Amino acid sequence: MRLTTLLDTSGSGPWPTSSTATTDDRAFDQLVEGLIPCRNEDPELWFAEQTARVEQAKALCRECPIMAGCLAGALEREEPWGVWGGQVFIGGVVVPTKRGRGRPRKHPAA
């Protein structure tokens, strides 16, 4: 099983159980489940609006053993938003930091 598809396999968490997962996939998923923060923490954390919660999700990702695979998969899928592989995605691309709602533009409109 590729690491980039690990989050799409069966097991606990916010992801649906895959009907195509083999017994080996399920065993591997159970083995690493305790090591992957997004499987143990509140799933809403990775899709939070508040900057502090987004930074908390990014910090948890830095401890994850499959962070690089998660980021590669998110880039490949062009994830529309959320924290994936320790990076913030908005509109399918990585952004350096997520700005809070209602903040003024970084550069004045032309």
Image (cartoon, rainbow, N blue to C red):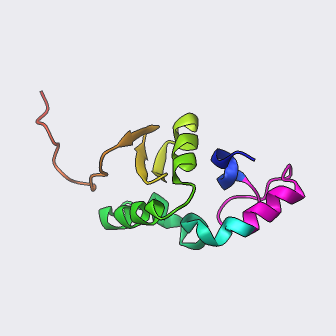
Front-most of 100 and 2? Answer: 2
Picture coordinates of residue 15 (x, y %)? 68, 59
- Is residue 84 on the magenta stretch? no
- Is residue 27 on the magenta stretch? yes
Front-most of 30 and 19? Answer: 30
Front-most of 29 and 101? Answer: 29
Picture coordinates of residue 69 (x, y %)? 57, 47
Q: Residue at x 47, y 37 (%)?
A: 92
Q: Residue at x 80, y 53 (%)?
A: 18
Q: Is residue 67 left or right of residue 95?
A: right
Location of residue 43 by image quarter:
bottom right
Quarter of the figure that contains the C terminus: top left
Query: Measured along the vertical axis of the image, is residue 6 above or below residue 28?
Result: above
Location of residue 74 by image quarter:
top right
Q: Farthest residue toward the right?
A: 23
Q: Farthest residue toward the top?
A: 110
Q: Is residue 82 left or right of residue 73?
A: left
Q: In the image, which residues are magenta?
A: 9-30
Q: Residue at x 23, y 54 (%)?
A: 102
Picture coordinates of residue 38 (x, y %)? 56, 64
Q: Is residue 25 left or right of residue 6?
A: right
Total numbered circles? 0
Front-most of 38 and 44? Answer: 38
Location of residue 57 by image quarter:
bottom left
Picture coordinates of residue 19 (x, y %)? 86, 52
Q: Main secondary structure of the magenta part?
A: loop
